[in-house]
Amino acid sequence: MMAQSTSDPGAVAVDWELDVTDSLLLQILAYVCPSIFGGIALLAGGLLLWLVVSAVLDGDLARAVGIVAFAILALLSRRYLPALLETNLTDPFWNRYSRRGLVIGSVCGALILLGSAQLHPTAPFVVFIASWVPLVLTAAFPTSGHAEPAVGTLVIDDTEVPLEAVSGFRMGSVGTFAVCWLSYTRGVPTAPRLIFLPSNYVDVVTELIDTGTESSRRARSTIGRTERLVAGLFGLGMIALGPVLWVILPPGDGQAVALYAGAMFGLFGMLLLWYAYSA
């Protein structure tokens, strides 16, 4: 649950703590990727069961035993499986995902994968890649913050935001929480760029960032023309990689490779283009 603030939003200082359990939208987003993985596991288990049953019905018990033994050995041979079953994490896996939610999500994930396969052979792969987007969005949770306008302090997850180096920010509210994206002048060390906070504290944080930005007299430094050109060309090249491979590679597996390359490299290409445009 969301922690209570130490004072009212209009007072000297406020503290907050957000987790995925504080918003229905965040909970749904957090379940997307595990549900797709669960759907893949269900489909793989269903395929394994079908192969075993087919072997038994054909009277080939040796093949049925061999399939089961191969599946067990394949799982046990992977080092990460025992690590997943025995973890020393302070935040247990089940604290974020309930067993019932994972079961329901896995069934829905399997149905989505099967339904997408009916549309196009590569559609399940697109669904798998897309499922990582909400995982990235919810990876920053749980998050905590402390804002103290009286002394000009903003701390996110125990890291102080250098307000004097903030060159701009964008704020957007989504239900009970808000998302703030901070931009810094060039040369600033690692600092929080995404801030998640309760919607009722938006005014406090916005006023604090505005005050810090206005009080700064540092000129905003930009990248050179050559660096901007190189970043833009690299970005265009990475975006064009997927379409080019789609054209030159043969249909079927080649198009799946092109789709994967386009999704992965295209994302970084867009980031480079944005950097070349906004830096």
Image: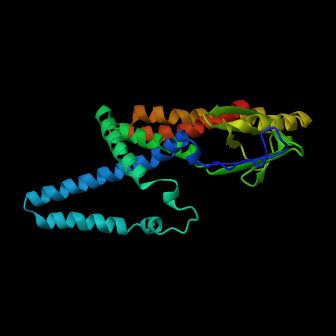
Q: Position of residue 121 (x, y in %)?
A: 31, 37
* Placement of 94 over or under 262, stated as above or below: below
Please give left or right for residue 78 compared with residue 189 in the image: left
Tally of marks:
0
Judging depth in this view, the residue of 118 and 204 nearest the camera is 204
* Placement of 216 over or under 51, stated as above or below: above
Residue at image location 49% in from the left, 38% down from the top: 263
Please give left or right for residue 221 compared with residue 81 in the image: right
Q: In the image as oriented, which residue stretches furthest toward the left? A: 59
Residue at image location 49% in from the left, 42% down from the top: 28
Judging depth in this view, the residue of 78 and 25 nearest the camera is 25
Colour convention: rainbow
Indicate the quadrant containing the C terminus: top left, top right, bottom left or bottom right: top right
Q: Position of residue 245 (x, y in %)?
A: 44, 36
* Placement of 118 over or under 41, stated as above or below: above
Instruction: For residue 229, say whether it is visible.
Output: no
Residue at image location 37% in from the left, 69% down from the top: 77
Q: Position of residue 43 (x, y in %)?
A: 30, 50
Residue at image location 65% in from the left, 32% down from the top: 173
Q: Position of residue 268 (x, y in %)?
A: 59, 40
Instruction: For residue 9, say whether it is visible.
Output: yes
Q: Quadrant of residue 118?
A: top left
Please give left or right for residue 156 compared with residue 211 in the image: left
Q: Quadrant of residue 278?
A: top right
Please give left or right for residue 100 compared with residue 241 in the image: left
